[in-house]
Image (spheres, grey):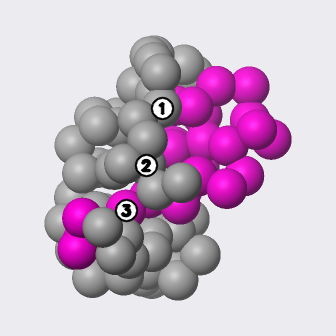
Amino acid sequence: MPRCCSPVPEEFAPTYASVVVGDLEAKVLALERGPLVPCVTSWCAKCCRPYLLTTCLPLFHSPSAHHAHMVALAGVLRGA
């Protein structure tokens, strides 16, 4: 289910990874406002906007660690 339609509990609770990335919530929202990034965002047909993919969320110890990983991955994929 897309993150926009099914909110993740405590997804921005601080973790080491989220602190390293810095301002995680703003960066996730910026990803969701921008163009699609393969392997990081997808299109929600219900909301008609991009959303952060969360399919691998169970592989991380916390939602914010997952989101920090996705923000970093987006930067690599964009060449930042």
Q: Do the residues labelled 1 and 2 touch (CB within 8 Å)?
A: yes
Q: Tell me how many marks there are.
A: 3
Q: Are marks 2 and 3 in contact (CB under 8 Å)?
A: yes
Quarter of the image where one finds residue 31: bottom left
Q: Mark 1 highlights which residue?
A: 8
Q: Which of marks 2 and 3 is nearer the N terminus?
A: 2
Q: Is residue 6 left or right of residue 62?
A: left
In this picture, is 35 found above or below 67?
below
Q: Which of marks 1 and 2 is nearer the N terminus?
A: 2
Q: Position of residue 70 (x, y in %)?
A: 54, 56
Residue at 46 percent of width and 56 percent of height: 2
Q: In which quarter of the image is the N terminus?
A: bottom right
CA gap, disc 2 and disc 3: 6 Å
Nearer to me, 5 or 51:
5
Q: Mark 2 highlights which residue?
A: 3
Q: Mark 3 highlights which residue?
A: 51
Whether 64 is among the magenta residues is yes
Residue at 72 percent of width and 52 percent of height: 56
Element carrying mark 2: loop
Q: Which amino acid does label 2 sit on?
A: Arg
Q: Which of marks 3 and 1 is nearer the N terminus?
A: 1
Q: Where is residue 47 in the image (x, y as percent from the top left)?
A: 24, 64
Q: Which amino acid does label 1 sit on?
A: Val
Q: What residue type is labelled 3?
A: Tyr
Nearer to me, 38 or 5:
5
How packed mark 2 is, by other alpha carbons closer than 10 Å (few <14, some 14-19, many 20 or more), is some
CA gap, disc 1 and disc 2: 7 Å
Q: Which mark is residue 34?
A: none
